[in-house]
């Protein structure tokens, strides 16, 4: 939740669009433009989040790293800007690690340095028509990420004459005892390694003919992860692409495989059912991009924690907020499961969100033999909800949920079991005219196996909906701009009766 949104409750009391649209429990900058999350690390009880930031306008511009900190990834305090552009260029996306053993020599064992790597994007060189205007540079912090010193011998990786060469993500590879870094280079991921975070050796490249191409790859992340319920460890590569997402614009595909310390290899990228989607996607909704994971999470915690940018380059610069633009997704825990021989990511909101539940309405069974209101404004503030239930008795039919208001704004989402897809349809959810791409089509995600029962979790935060199906195996995140807050959540009757079980409607606190 934003510290600055604490007084924003009286939506109906004639407050501005600004207040109408600012989320309750997702991070937004107080003012200015934001895109990708950057440099996230955990240290001494604080989660750090940096982000692509342009403080002087609400459209993309000369990039800085903004900064926010949180004890729980839900309530964020915006801090001072961490990195400013300089004569070498704008500060594009990148990552940060805690150099616990002071391998870089920038700090000491007593006060380990935090080392960040980012891309310098040189706009002056870009204008000359040269293509080598992106290079990788580092900076370090000796005060736990609050202030930063740029390294004197930047860049640490020069441009090898590749136009799109950016977004370094560093990880400590404890298995091979080395620092590794992945970088998006045109339509591949380059993997580098280092012993000191300063000198980097190119180890390999991945992805030339794999997954979705046709546009630059951006913002990779690469990490080992235990397969749930086994002792097996696999490596996951998250690889954003824009455009090329399954529903248009920006999205993040992923690959699961093995890493020998130099080369990443995969056995399969997708199965037949997923073929038309071209790859596996972290999120099939239109608004989860450039997401990466936190570094330095203690072993005792052991989670893989992820956050994305809740927008899409197709319209991010045009959404109808005024003094600020863009929010992050809810922070999510990522797990890897093996389902019938296929490795799949599952995601769920971080458990810290549970602390924000102020009231729970439980219903054991709701029989759906007619269109039914599950919750409305008479019993809950519809702008901050975490709803969970299991659907039982499903047939090959369409199961349609509606989040709506009296202004006749409605966002539909659900499960089309007949034609085998999950969907979100925001065509009539309020303002859409700011971009032709915003609600041109419904967004869909594949159903790959038959089921007659499925669990569903829905997070609603004023202007966003994040739907987690089947324990987070399929996720869809989308934003919307209704004319008034939504005030009713209902489910449409299907041809045959079915039921919702274990319904738990959690009201989230206003701060
Ligand atoms: C992804 C991206 C990155 C780049 C940054 C610039 O959204 O295009 O590739 O570093 O945004 O702001």
Image (cartoon, rainbow, N blue to C red):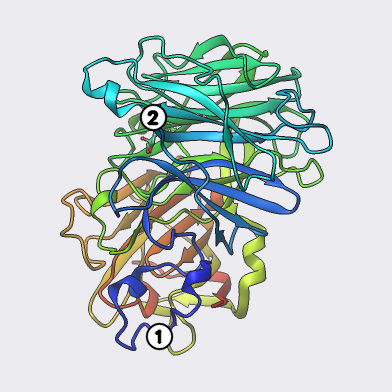
Is 67 placed left or right of 442 in the picture? Answer: right
Q: Nearer the viewer, residue 316 or 199?
A: 199
Q: Position of residue 103 (x, y in %)?
A: 74, 23
Disc 1 crowd, CA 10 A, few/some/many (<14, 14-19, 20+): few
Q: Position of residue 216 (x, y in %)?
A: 34, 25
- At 53% from the left and 54% from the top, the residue drawn is 80
Q: Nearer the viewer, residue 308 or 107?
A: 107
- At 76% from the left and 28% from the top, the residue drawn is 102
Q: Quadrant of ligand 1?
A: top left
Which of discs 1 and 2 lies nearer the camera? The answer is 2
Q: Is residue 275 above or below residue 505?
A: above
Residue 238 appears in view: no
Q: Which mark is residue 10?
A: 1
Q: Which mark is residue 87?
A: 2
Say whether marks 1 and 2 touch (CB < 8 Å).
no
- At 54% from the left and 10% from the top, the residue drawn is 204
Q: Position of residue 329 (x, y in %)?
A: 47, 54
Is 433 placed left or right of 61 in the picture? Answer: left
- Determine the secondary structure under disc 1: loop
């Amino acid at each position: 939740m934003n510290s600055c949104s604490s007084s924003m409750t009286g939506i109906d009391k004639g407050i501005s669009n600004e207040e109408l649209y600012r989320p309750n429990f997702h991070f937004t900058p107080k003012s200015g433009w934001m895109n990708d999350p950057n440099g996230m690390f955990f240290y001494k009880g604080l989660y750090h989040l940096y982000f692509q930031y342009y403080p002087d306008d609400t459209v993309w511009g000369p990039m800085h790293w903004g900064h926010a900190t949180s004890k729980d990834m839900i309530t964020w305090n915006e801090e001072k800007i961490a990195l400013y552009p300089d004569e070498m260029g704008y500060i594009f996306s990148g990552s940060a690690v805690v150099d616990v053993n002071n391998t870089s020599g920038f700090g000491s064992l007593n006060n380990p340095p935090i080392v960040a790597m980012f891309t310098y994007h040189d706009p002056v060189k870009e204008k000359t028509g040269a293509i080598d205007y992106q290079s990788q540079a580092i900076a370090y912090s000796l005060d736990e990420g609050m202030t930063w010193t740029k390294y004197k011998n930047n860049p640490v990786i020069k441009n090898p004459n590749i136009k799109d060469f950016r977004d370094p993500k560093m990880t400590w590879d404890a298995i091979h005892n080395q620092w590794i870094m992945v970088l998006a280079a045109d339509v591949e991921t380059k993997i580098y390694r280092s012993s000191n975070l300063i000198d980097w050796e190119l180890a390999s490249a991945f992805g030339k003919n794999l997954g979705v191409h046709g546009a630059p790859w951006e913002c990779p992340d690469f990490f080992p992860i235990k397969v749930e319920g086994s002792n097996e460890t696999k490596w996951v590569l998250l690889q954003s692409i824009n455009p090329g997402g399954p529903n248009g614009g920006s999205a993040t595909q992923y690959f699961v495989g093995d890493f020998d310390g130099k080369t990443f290899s995969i056995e399969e990228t997708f199965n037949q059912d997923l073929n038309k989607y071209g790859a596996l996607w972290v999120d099939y909704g239109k608004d989860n991009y450039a997401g990466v994971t936190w570094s330095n999470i203690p072993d005792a915690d052991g989670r893989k924690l992820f956050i994305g940018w809740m927008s899409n380059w197709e319209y991010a610069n045009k959404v109808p907020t005024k003094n600020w633009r863009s929010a992050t997704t809810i922070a999510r825990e990522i797990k890897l499961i093996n389902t019938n021989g296929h490795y799949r990511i599952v995601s769920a909101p971080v458990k810290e969100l549970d602390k924000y539940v102020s009231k729970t309405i439980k219903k054991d069974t709701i029989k759906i033999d007619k269109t039914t209101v599950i919750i409305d404004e008479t019993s809950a503030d519809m702008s901050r909800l975490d709803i969970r239930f299991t659907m039982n008795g499903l047939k090959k039919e369409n199961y349609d949920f509606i989040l709506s208001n009296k202004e006749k704004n409605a966002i539909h989402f659900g499960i089309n079991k007949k034609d085998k897809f999950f969907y979100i349809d925001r065509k009539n959810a309020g303002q859409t005219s700011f971009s032709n791409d915003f609600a041109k089509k419904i967004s869909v995600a594949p159903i790959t196996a038959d089921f007659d029962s499925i669990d569903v979790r829905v997070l609603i935060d004023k202007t966003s909906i994040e739907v987690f199906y089947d324990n987070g195996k399929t996720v869809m995140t989308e934003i919307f701009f209704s004319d008034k807050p939504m005030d009713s959540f209902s489910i449409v009757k299907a041809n045959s009766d079915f039921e919702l079980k274990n319904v738990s409607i959690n009201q989230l606190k206003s701060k």
